[in-house]
């Protein structure tokens, strides 16, 4: 079985030294969130994730959810753990105090999301969609719905789902068939079938609140005719008590490659009573509130699982003895961590994980600014950066999760491929993350066509990095990193110019370059993160030599060994799409 130790020291390093967004630091209500309070929260979070949640990962994999007589049962121990989880208030961490939440900023709750992903993705998914539903209801529902549903969701007594997918409609939501008929009494009746619904049914909460995309007959075709509805599993009385069962039932659950402790359900809506959220036919944009935050959280899932894979690989590499390293003096067999190639692999994982954690922390500050800053213009500016980076966090982090869990299996050798050590489970559990919440390829297409070609948010992001380099390039140790960052920013600008040219002549050239572009932006964003980490590390070297020296060494590895991948992706994109589109596949 794998072990997990929450990286609290690294998280506190970020919170204490890289909370460098001036606009974030102006948000009044977050000023009182002191480093001591954050340390306290992270220590408590580490405890529950290490001691209670992490053991559930293996249990869920070996004793998956069961569907019997229309009822879904969670794996053994999940219910008890969930009860403690909600009693300790973890579902309410980032929610509005008005509805019983603790009002913590994203800068803090994102660390918790990472820990929970590291500990057990299956267990996490029971509460994750609840937070998505909470956000969607908070931003788009009327006061009556908010007051009726939000306090119970925040408390964790009711959970949430996101019901988009149907058998004929995955990426292309314009194909939705579920219909919603207006009852002219403030409610609608929904009929249709949704598939692949995470936590669509289970036995952990008293009620389940489905957020469902459906079409009102007579509305526009395609995505312009989609509306969003709230459909509870049990109807809710006006006083908040639970009423009779609604017309939504589970037909089956999926047998899956990973996240077996999380039920993935086929839900049948048969004249189920629902309530319109937001405006008619504007459901997709309301659902995007949920989906965009979810996409970032899915990225964090990839980071969290990668962290567990790294930690276990490191421990194994320190114990497993095979062969003799080049510097072997005593002729005894060495631990594999002494081999340069294993060290390369471990450092690759570490440099990506810590760079991503830092980038996620940067983005969390932008999200907090976009939601809470008092000035409209500043909020909008942050919103644009969040929108630019959402597909990057979602796709780059989860693709790297696949790479890192794959590397972990390799470090364990045959013991990684067999089940005993629990390493192959990390690979299987992570494998859904590049698929759900919009596949990674579709994220890359969204990034290029909607956020780069149609918008100038990329140049805003590049300016932020340039400013950082300009201010610090003369600092001790940062000269080489500055040069590399500047030359890679030039590459990024050249790439975005090339996309513009391609877009005028051949759209397939652009489409075939989207994945490469997203990777380039991902690698350069991590270089920006490592630049800032190094800046602090050089300054603080004498305070904690061990910690900061290791940071500087990892930064050097990142700039030397990982960042060059950006150029490789650019070169690949330059070749266009002719060969790709000429293939006959016969
Ligand atoms: C375990 C699990 C949990 C899930 N949870 C939920 C949930 O809670 N709620 C929910 O609504 N859904 C959920 N889903 C569904 C998930 O979001 C979809 O599977 C995903 O969006 C992809 O849709 P699809 O499977 O139909 O693939 P398709 O859309 O058929 O895509 C197939 C392939 O074609 C590519 N592709 C599609 N369109 C394009 C295009 N325009 N250009 C280029 N390439 C394209 C895709 O990238 C992919 O590689 C879940 C799925 C799983 C497996």
Image (cartoon, rainbow, N blue to C red):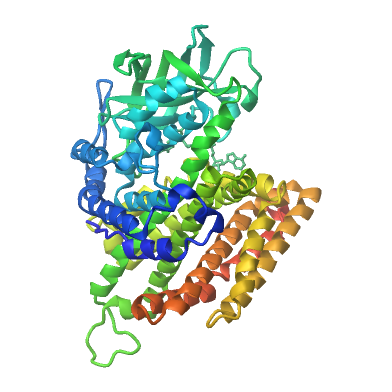
Q: Residue at x 42, y 17 (%)?
A: 269
Q: Looking at the image, which is closer to me, 116 or 165?
A: 116
Q: Residue at x 65, y 21 (%)?
A: 221
Asked if 115 appears above or below 253 in the picture, the reply is below
- Locate residue 23: give its quadrant: bottom right
Instruction: Count the numbered circles shown.
Output: 0
- Locate residue 273: give its quadrant: top left
- Locate residue 9: give its quadrant: bottom left
Q: Looking at the image, which is closer to me, 274 or 166?
A: 274
Q: Is residue 476 left or right of residue 312?
A: right
Asked if 344 appears above or below 205 in the picture, the reply is below
Q: Is residue 464 left or right of residue 432?
A: right
Q: Looking at the image, which is closer to me, 414 or 181?
A: 181
Could you tell me residue 328's position as x and y percent? 29, 89
Quadrant where the N terminus sits is: bottom left
Could you tell me residue 191's position as x and y percent? 47, 15
Could you tell me residue 117's position as x and y percent? 35, 50
Could you tell me residue 32's position as x and y percent? 40, 52
Quadrant where the C terminus sits is: top right
Q: Judge whether residue 582 can be spotted in this image.
A: no
Residue at the far bottom: name it. Answer: 329
């Amino acid at each position: 079985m794998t072990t997990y130790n929450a990286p609290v020291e690294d998280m506190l390093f970020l919170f204490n030294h890289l909370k460098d967004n001036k606009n974030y630091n102006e948000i009044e209500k977050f000023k009182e969130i002191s480093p001591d309070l954050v340390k306290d929260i992270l220590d408590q979070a580490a405890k529950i994730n290490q001691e209670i949640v992490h053991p559930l990962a293996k249990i869920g994999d070996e004793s998956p959810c069961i569907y019997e007589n229309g009822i879904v049962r969670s794996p053994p121990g999940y219910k008890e753990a969930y009860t403690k989880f909600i009693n300790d208030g973890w579902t309410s961490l980032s929610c509005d105090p008005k509805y019983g939440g603790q009002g913590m900023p994203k800068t803090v709750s994102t660390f918790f999301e990472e820990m929970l992903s590291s500990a057990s993705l299956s267990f996490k998914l029971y509460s994750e969609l609840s937070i998505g539903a909470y956000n969607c209801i908070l931003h788009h529902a009327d006061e009556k719905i908010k007051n009726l549903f939000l306090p119970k969701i925040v408390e964790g007594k009711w959970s949430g789902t996101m019901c988009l997918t149907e058998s004929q409609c995955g990426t292309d939501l314009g194909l939705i068939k579920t219909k919603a008929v207006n009852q002219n009494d403030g409610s609608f009746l929904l009929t249709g079938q949704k598939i692949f619904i995470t936590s669509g049914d289970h036995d952990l909460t008293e009620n389940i609140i489905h957020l469902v995309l459906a079409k009102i007959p007579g509305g526009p075709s395609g995505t312009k005719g989609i509306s969003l509805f709230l459909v509870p599993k049990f109807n809710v009385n006006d006083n908040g008590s639970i009423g009779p069962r609604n017309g939504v039932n589970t037909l089956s659950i999926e047998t899956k490659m990973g996240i077996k402790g999380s039920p993935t359900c086929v839900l049948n809506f048969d004249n189920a009573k629902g309530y319109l959220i937001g405006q008619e036919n504007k459901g997709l944009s309301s659902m995007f509130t949920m989906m965009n935050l979810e996409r970032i959280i899915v990225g964090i899932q990839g980071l969290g699982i990668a962290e567990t894979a790294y930690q276990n690989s490191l421990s194994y590499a320190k114990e497993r003895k095979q062969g003799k390293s080049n510097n072997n003096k005593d002729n005894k067999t060495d631990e594999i961590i002494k081999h340069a190639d294993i060290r390369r692999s471990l450092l690759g994982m570490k440099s990506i994980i810590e760079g991503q954690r830092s980038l996620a922390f940067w983005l969390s500050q932008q999200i907090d600014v976009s939601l809470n800053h008092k000035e409209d213009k500043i909020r909008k500016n942050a919103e644009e950066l969040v929108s630019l980076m959402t597909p990057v966090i979602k796709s780059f982090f989860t693709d790297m999760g696949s790479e890192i869990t794959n590397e972990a299996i390799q470090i364990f050798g045959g013991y990684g491929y067999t089940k005993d050590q629990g390493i192959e489970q990390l690979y299987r559990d992570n494998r859904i993350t590049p698929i759900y919440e919009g596949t990674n390829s579709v994220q890359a297409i969204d990034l290029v066509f909607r956020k780069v070609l149609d918008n100038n948010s990329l140049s805003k992001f590049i300016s932020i990095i340039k400013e950082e380099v300009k201010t610090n390039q003369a600092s001790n140790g940062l000269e080489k990193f500055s040069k590399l960052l500047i030359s890679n920013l030039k590459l990024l600008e050249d790439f975005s110019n090339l996309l513009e040219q391609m877009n005028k002549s051949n759209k397939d050239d652009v489409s075939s370059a989207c994945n490469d572009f997203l990777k380039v932006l991902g690698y350069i964003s991590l270089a920006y993160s490592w630049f800032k980490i190094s800046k602090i590390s050089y300054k603080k070297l004498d305070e904690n030599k061990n910690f900061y020296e290791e940071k500087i060494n990892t930064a050097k590895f990142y700039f030397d060994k990982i960042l060059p991948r950006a150029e490789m992706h650019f070169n690949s994109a330059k070749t266009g799409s002719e060969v790709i589109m000429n293939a006959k596949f016969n």
